[in-house]
């Protein structure tokens, strides 16, 4: 007897197709990505694109960053006393809780007393690495131009040991809402928060580092938001690229001669990453590439295989190769 509210039963052909092993499926099926994104992924990862795309669909770990203003990694690990928690593979202050199998869930670490005391923050290891590579040091003047909720602002403040000054800015003030409580809990005291672009005018040409954590498609974080890739369109990608170019043009004006412009995305698409940097350099002219291979080796000696490194155009992280979310990092030095 039929049920008008149920779908039609599967045909024999459909049942046979569903029972085939995944290894025999077309690349785009094994990659678990929208058809229109497959050329973008293949252009970046070449013959590894299916494995990288599949890793972007896998369950993610839970990463923490020990707040060195108040604690260190060993202290946090001892306080949490979670048998599955271990030091991150690359980030020196990172802690990783591996992906949960089956239908389980990660522990609610934000309910831990150590979190309430500001000993750690939840932050993907790739984001920690990007903040570390920016090179903030005590006494510097730093502008976090797209600060959002403040994850990288907090990491920069810890690296600067609360000395110097960080200006945390975001043009959309609602994105900044969580930063105030996070700064208080972390005891990050060298941060000024502003959503008003006019208040940044006195900083023009004076910053040692301008960090742009650019708005992007978020393709590098698909494993944390699996629905996002199916809602993404090529029109949204183009809108993000235009926004990134405008931000680069504006934010670069705050870098002092000899200072660094740091461009970061959580995207794996070349059009948002290396190609965006190339276009900016062609327009701006006053910025030269640093040696990204040397920068990586200085921070992570012996781990060259953990990232895709283009000496002039930047550093790319990805789940399959780096074990992190997908991130892109490029630093340019102002030469005039």
Image (tube, grey):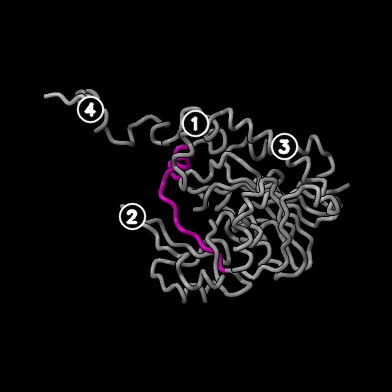
Judging depth in this view, the residue of 167 and 63 nearest the camera is 167
State how far apart marks 1 and 3 are (Cα): 24 Å
Which residue is under mark 1? 38
Circles 4 and 1, Cβ within 8 Å, touching? The answer is no
Look at discs 4 and 1 and give the one toward the viewer. 4
Q: Is residue 36 left or right of residue 290?
A: left
Residue at mark 2 to residue at mark 4: CA–CA distance = 34 Å
Judge from the rendering whether residue 19 lies leftward or rightward of residue 288; answer left or right. left
Q: Which mark is residue 101?
A: 2
Q: Nearer the viewer, residue 95 or 168?
A: 168
Mark 3 vs mark 4: give the one in front: 4
Q: Left or right: 11 with respect to 211?
A: left
Residue 140 drawn above or below residue 258: below
The numbered mark, 2 or 3, whose residue comes first in the sequence reads 2
Q: Could you tell which of marks 4 and 1 lies nearer the N-terminus?
A: 4
Q: Secondary structure at mark 1?
A: helix
Residue at image point 64% right, 32% down? 239
Residue 53 image position (x, y, % from top left): 46, 40
**Which badge, 2 or 1, comes first in the chain's sequence?**
1
Q: Which residue is mark 4?
A: 5
């Amino acid at each position: 007897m039929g049920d008008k509210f149920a779908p039609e039963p599967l045909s024999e052909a459909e049942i046979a197709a569903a029972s085939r092993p995944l290894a025999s499926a077309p690349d785009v099926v094994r990659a678990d990505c929208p058809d229109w994104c497959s050329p973008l992924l293949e252009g970046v990862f070449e013959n590894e694109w299916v494995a990288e795309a599949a890793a972007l669909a896998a369950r993610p770990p839970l990463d923490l960053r020990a707040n060195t203003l108040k604690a260190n990694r060993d202290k946090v690990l001892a306080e949490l006393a979670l048998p599955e928690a271990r030091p991150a593979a690359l980030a020196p202050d990172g802690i990783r809780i591996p992906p949960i199998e089956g239908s389980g869930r990660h522990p609610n670490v934000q309910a831990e007393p150590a979190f309430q005391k500001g000993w750690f923050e939840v932050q993907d290891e790739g984001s920690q690495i990007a903040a570390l590579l920016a090179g903030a040091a005590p006494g510097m003047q730093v502008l976090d131009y797209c600060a959002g909720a403040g994850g990288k602002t907090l990491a920069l403040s810890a690296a600067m040991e609360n000395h110097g000054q960080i200006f945390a800015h975001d043009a959309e003030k609602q994105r900044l809402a969580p930063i105030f409580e996070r700064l208080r809990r972390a005891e990050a005291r060298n941060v000024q928060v502003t959503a008003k672009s006019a208040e940044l005018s006195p900083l023009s040409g004076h910053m040692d580092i301008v960090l742009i954590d650019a708005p992007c498609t978020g393709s590098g974080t698909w494993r944390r938001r699996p629905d996002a890739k199916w809602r993404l369109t090529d029109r949204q990608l183009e809108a993000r690229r235009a926004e990134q170019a405008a931000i680069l043009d504006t934010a670069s004006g705050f870098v002092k001669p000899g200072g660094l412009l740091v461009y970061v995305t959580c995207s794996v698409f070349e059009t948002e990453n290396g190609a965006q940097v190339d276009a900016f350099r062609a327009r701006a002219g006053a910025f030269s590439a640093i040696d990204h291979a040397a920068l990586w080796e200085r921070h992570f000696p012996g781990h060259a295989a953990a990232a895709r490194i283009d000496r002039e155009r930047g550093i790319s992280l990805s789940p399959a190769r780096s074990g992190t979310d997908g991130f892109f990092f490029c630093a340019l030095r102002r030469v005039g």
